[in-house]
């Protein structure tokens, strides 16, 4: 039996977003050790605040301060903290309804063990030593047996308010392509593209999935496709990606290889970005020792007729 491939994979995206007046006030408040909620038209206080009532869709702007103390409404114990989580020792994920709020805030509770946590546990905020205007300005919650704190009645008006944030989303996992895609990857290393044909609808899937998602039956018949193909649709990339040494702008396209029943992704090179078009005939370009095409370039053939690839858009 051929070796099934596997490799570590990281999907990472630093998402930059601007903040409206409600979220700006909330995050600026955390920087100043103030927790703000927002009042709904029926008198509820939502923490974290939102710009529109999830029940009535009313626009919300009436900010109100709540206490940094509260009550655990539900919880789950985290035995093995992961990279980037609030604490590096075991802790509880908790939903905390802060005093003065009607909804709960998700965060970490620093507790010695699961036996120390229960629904109804009283807690308070432990503030981070350095605060920048982010949810991480709350370092965590900690157990608290004192009196409920009294908010000072802050109005939500701040100097030097936070206008935007960068949220770093990252997913680390081990990817295994399975039998069908392992065969596809191994064929690419030989400068060949292979798919698998569905025995029912006869569609050729490239890359193969091992089963037809339409008919729900296993696929096993290998079919070599390409090497040429047709650009079915495309986009012009104007933002340079981290760790990708390609000058912008460049074109990323869906390419239907000859004989395939599904378009795959590929970069288009060898032609100015503003001359790429639907129907353009292309072929793969391999770098020395490369296990997959570096990009696709025009073949010089006449453009494909729309009727030949319209079902592959």
Image (tube, rainbow, N blue to C red):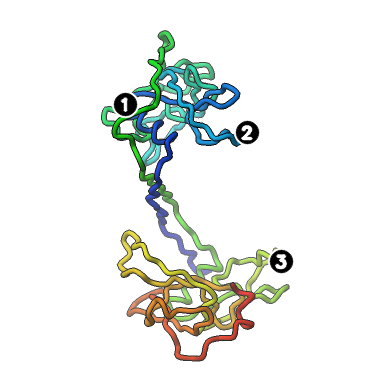
The circle drawn on residue 215 is: 3
Q: Please tell me whether mark 2 sits on a helix, a strand or a loop.
A: loop
Which badge, 2 or 3, comes first in the chain's sequence?
2
Q: Please tell me whether mark 1 sits on a helix, a strand or a loop.
A: loop
Q: In which quadrant is the C terminus drawn?
A: bottom right
Foreground tag (2 vs 3): 2
* Of the pair 132 and 196, the residue shown nearer to us: 132
Task: Return the x and y of residue 135 as percentages of the image width and height.
Answer: 39, 33
Label 2 belongs to which residue?
A: 56
* Of the pair 216 and 61, the residue shown nearer to us: 61
- Whole-number angstrom distance, CA of label 2 to CA of label 1: 31 Å
Q: Residue at x 36, y 30 (%)?
A: 89
Q: Residue at x 45, y 83 (%)?
A: 283
Q: What is the quadrant of residue 274 in the picture?
A: bottom left
Which badge, 3 or 1, comes first in the chain's sequence?
1
Horizontally, residue 111 falls left or right of residue 50, namely: left
10 Å neighbourhood of mark 1: few (<14), some, or many (≥20)? some
Label 1 belongs to which residue?
A: 32
Q: Residue at x 39, y 76 (%)?
A: 273
* Of the pair 274 and 148, the residue shown nearer to us: 274
Q: Is residue 165 above or below residue 189?
A: above
- Whole-number angstrom distance, CA of label 3 to CA of label 1: 58 Å
Which badge, 2 or 1, comes first in the chain's sequence?
1
Residue 169 visible in the current orientation: yes
Residue 139 visible in the current orientation: no
Foreground tag (3 vs 1): 1
Looking at the image, do the residues carrying marks 2 and 1 touch, with CB atoms under 8 Å apart?
A: no
10 Å neighbourhood of mark 3: few (<14), some, or many (≥20)? few
């Amino acid at each position: 039996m051929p070796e099934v491939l596997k490799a570590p994979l990281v999907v990472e995206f630093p998402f930059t977003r601007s903040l409206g007046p409600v979220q700006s006030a909330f995050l600026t408040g955390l920087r100043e050790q103030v927790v703000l909620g927002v009042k709904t038209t029926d008198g509820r206080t939502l923490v974290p605040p939102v710009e529109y009532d999830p029940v009535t869709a009313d626009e919300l702007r009436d900010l109100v301060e709540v206490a940094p103390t509260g009550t655990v409404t539900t919880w789950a114990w985290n035995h093995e903290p992961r990279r980037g989580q609030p604490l590096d020792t075991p802790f509880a994920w908790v939903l905390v309804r802060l005093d003065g709020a009607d909804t709960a805030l998700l965060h970490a509770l620093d507790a010695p063990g699961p036996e120390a946590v229960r629904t109804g546990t009283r807690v308070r905020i432990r503030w981070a030593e350095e605060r920048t205007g982010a949810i991480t300005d709350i370092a965590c919650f900690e157990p608290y047996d004192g009196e409920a704190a009294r908010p000072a009645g802050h109005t939500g008006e701040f100097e030097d308010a936070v206008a935007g944030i960068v949220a770093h989303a990252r997913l680390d996992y081990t990817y295994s392509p399975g039998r069908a895609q392992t065969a596809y990857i191994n064929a690419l290393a030989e400068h060949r593209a292979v798919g698998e044909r569905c025995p029912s609808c006869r569609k050729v899937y490239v890359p193969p999935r091992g089963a037809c998602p339409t008919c729900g039956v296993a696929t096993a018949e290998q079919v070599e496709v390409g090497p040429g193909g047709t650009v079915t649709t495309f986009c012009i990339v104007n933002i340079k990606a981290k760790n990708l040494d390609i000058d912008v702008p460049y074109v990323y396209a869906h390419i239907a290889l000859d004989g395939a029943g599904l378009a795959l992704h590929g970069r288009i090179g060898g032609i100015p970005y503003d001359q790429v078009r639907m129907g353009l005939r292309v072929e793969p370009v391999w770098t020395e020792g490369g296990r997959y095409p570096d990009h696709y370039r025009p073949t010089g053939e006449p453009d494909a007729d729309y009727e030949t690839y319209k079902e592959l858009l």
